[in-house]
Image (tube, grey):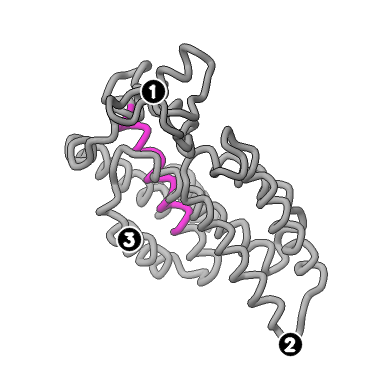
């Protein structure tokens, strides 16, 4: 009996968990699709160039500095931080570095969806199906562009909000921090605020309200909205 217990413990330690296998599979799939991810969309060069400009000058341009016909026109730098990250990946390992970064972000995103599903269902196979469906549905957006950070932050934001909703999380500070990063990484940060509003409204309409959780949710909204304004264009974002 003791031998069997020891064997199970060793197997549990040595053998990869289902979530780890899923993460590795998504990462490998994204690496394999690397050339396609780069070539389906032509924006990568602009993002790397703009990121390099920001790194080298220390300035975040709010006017067009590259185009011929629109030179000097107002430019909303809603992806400047993503441009810097992509440029750094390119400096470290060239286009391969950009692919590895994209693969890592995508794998982490869909692993979070898997983990979120597992927390809700406590059924690993069902959670895996949710992760696979999410990955398949989002595969058309597997591109080397800043929106990969919105995929990641949507998953993380939803997971953290669910923890608040069911009472596993008491704090709210992580949400404005995430929103600050999101608003500077990609313009779809508004998605996070919409998700918060839906969760808050749902809890508000519940007959048996948990006022402690509701209080945390109340703080999340305004603090995140204010955090989203901490960007180079302020309200113009």
Which residue is label 3 attached to? 132
Q: Pointer 3: residues within 10 angstroms few (<14), some, or many (20+)? A: some
Instruction: Identify the residue under disc 1.
Output: 65
Foreground mark, 3 or 1, reads 1
Q: Which residue is mark 2?
A: 207
At x 38%, y 23%, the residue is: 65
Which x, y percent locates residue 90? 34, 21
Q: Position of residue 132 (x, y in %)?
A: 32, 60
Determine whether the residue tagged by mark 1 lies in a helix, strand or loop.
loop
Image quadrant of residue 160? bottom right
Q: Residue at x 41, y 26 (%)?
A: 72
Give, as a single range, the part of the protein colored magenta: 98-113
Between 78 and 138, the residue placed more toward the observer is 78
* 115 or 101: nearer the viewer: 101
134, above or below 199, in the image: above
Q: Give the Cα distance between marks 1 and 2.
A: 55 Å
* Left or right of 169 on screen, residue 141: left
């Amino acid at each position: 009996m003791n031998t069997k217990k020891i064997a199970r413990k060793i197997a549990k330690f040595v053998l990869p968990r289902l979530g780890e296998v899923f993460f590795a599979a998504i990462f490998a799939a994204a690496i394999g699709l690397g050339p396609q991810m780069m070539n389906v969309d032509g924006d990568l060069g602009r993002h790397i160039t703009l990121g390099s400009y920001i790194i080298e000058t220390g300035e975040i341009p709010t006017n067009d500095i590259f185009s011929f016909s629109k030179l000097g026109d107002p430019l909303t730098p809603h992806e400047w931080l993503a441009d810097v990250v992509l440029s750094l990946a390119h400096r470290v390992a060239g286009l391969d570095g950009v692919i590895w970064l994209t693969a890592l972000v995508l794998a982490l995103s869909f692993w979070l969806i898997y983990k979120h599903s597992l927390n809700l269902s406590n059924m690993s196979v069902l959670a895996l199906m949710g992760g696979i469906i999410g990955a398949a549905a989002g595969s058309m957006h597997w591109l080397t562009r800043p929106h990969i950070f919105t995929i990641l932050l949507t998953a993380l934001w939803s997971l953290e909000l669910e923890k608040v909703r069911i009472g596993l999380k008491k704090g709210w500070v992580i949400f404005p921090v995430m929103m600050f990063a999101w608003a500077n990484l990609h313009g779809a940060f508004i998605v996070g605020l919409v998700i918060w509003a839906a969760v808050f409204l749902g809890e508000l309409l519940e007959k048996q309200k948990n006022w402690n959780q509701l209080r945390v949710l109340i703080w999340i909204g305004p603090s995140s909205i204010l955090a989203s304004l901490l960007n180079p264009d302020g309200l113009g974002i």
